Amino acid sequence: MMKRIIIGTRASKLAMKQTYEVVERLRKQWPDLEIAIEQIRTTGDRVTNVPLSQIGGDGVFVTEIEHALQERRIDLAVHSLKDLPSMQPEGLRLLILGPREDVRDVLVANETIQAQVQSGLAPQNLPTPLRIGTCSLRRIAQIRALWPDVQILPLRGNVDTRLRKLEAGDYDGIVSAAAGLHRLDMQQRLAGRLSYFSVEKLLPAPGQGAIALECRNEPEIGELLAPLNDPIVQATTTAERMFMRRLGAWCYLPVAAYADVRDGKLILRGMVASLDGQRRVSVAQEMAWTAAAGLERAEQFGVSLAEQALAQGADTIISEVDTKSMAQEYQSV
Ligand SMILES: NCc1[nH]cc(CCC(=O)O)c1CC(=O)O
């Protein structure tokens, strides 16, 4: 059994909060384990004024951390699963922590539409044009389907930066993952200004709300982390990520997927939409799920749902997304 481990993480508030959560869980499980934390600066942290897709797209928040794992400078990395590319690097594996945070996206309103948020956001009550900040193609496509006249404005940065830009009056509202706001205990501060999108209205990104533990594929560290693994969240997020991977969807495409397990059934929903919100392929499928079914079943399930989406025209929608021009401004997480 290992006596000491080094955990690598980004330095953002959200990343540190997630890391401390993991440290606490490890301490409970292994009281004698020595734990050190090493903060790692990623390309995504260094370059903040340029759209993510221009500085390398996929993996800008994780590549440096994965190198540190491969070079044995750290033993464990804590990530938001959503930030990880759907292809796993050689020699590294993922264990998913449970429980999963709220998977939904949420609209954070500024005072221009706060009253409408409280009365339920009927489209006819919203200002025209409604100015919404997001950089995610997945959110853009689905928000345009909900509110056809919406004006989408690019918005990047960590949670604090995004909220600061909202307070400055640049937007009527911004759309974020509820999980990030909840983990940073922002609900109180934002009370009365939050309007949650049901997953039916705005399907989340694969892995949204889940924390991933990444380590070398070696038995010693695997043994240490196994008790923290949540097999259900591991299976559902695996299905979501395989849906994404089969579509060849790098993080700048408008692709969404969400799975959960209810009454012994794994239900997976997937969606691909055009950026104008006009065309959409939505697919769903369920299978009996028990822990014994194994992850491979969940993987195949994600692939087969993606193939259904392709058969219904998802490939046309994907190929029509003008990735060159869109990639300059937006990403999809
Ligand atoms: N790269 C953005 C990112 N990565 C993880 C989260 C939130 C937490 C989560 O979904 O687990 C966010 C913020 C957002 O999308 O609004």
Image (cartoon, helix red, strand yellow):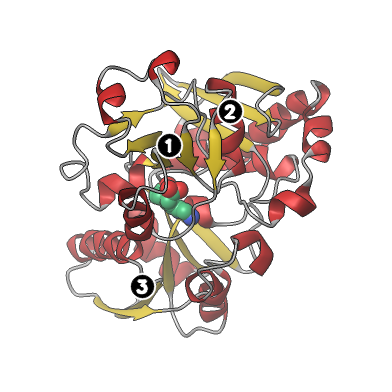
Query: Is residue 288 something that shows in the picture?
Result: no
Which comes before the other along the chain, label 2 or label 1?
A: 2
Give the amino acid at mark 2: Arg
Which residue is denoted by mark 1 in the rendering? 232
| In front of the other: 132 or 302 | 132
Give the amino acid at mark 1: Ile
Which comes before the other along the chain, label 2 or label 3?
A: 3
Left or right for 204, reference 300: left
Per the rendering, the mark at residue 144 is 2
**How far apart in space, not on screen, are marks 2 and 1 (Cα)?**
33 Å
Q: Secondary structure at mark 1?
A: helix
Task: Where is residue 248? Give x, y as percent.
Answer: 75, 45
Task: Where is residue 129? Give x, y as percent.
Answer: 50, 30
Per the rendering, the mark at residue 11 is 3
Give the amino acid at mark 3: Ala
What residue is shown at x 79% (from left), y 45% (from top)? 322
Task: Where is residue 74? Give x, y as percent.
Answer: 44, 80
> Given this view, does label 2 or label 1 mark the residue nearer the observer?
2
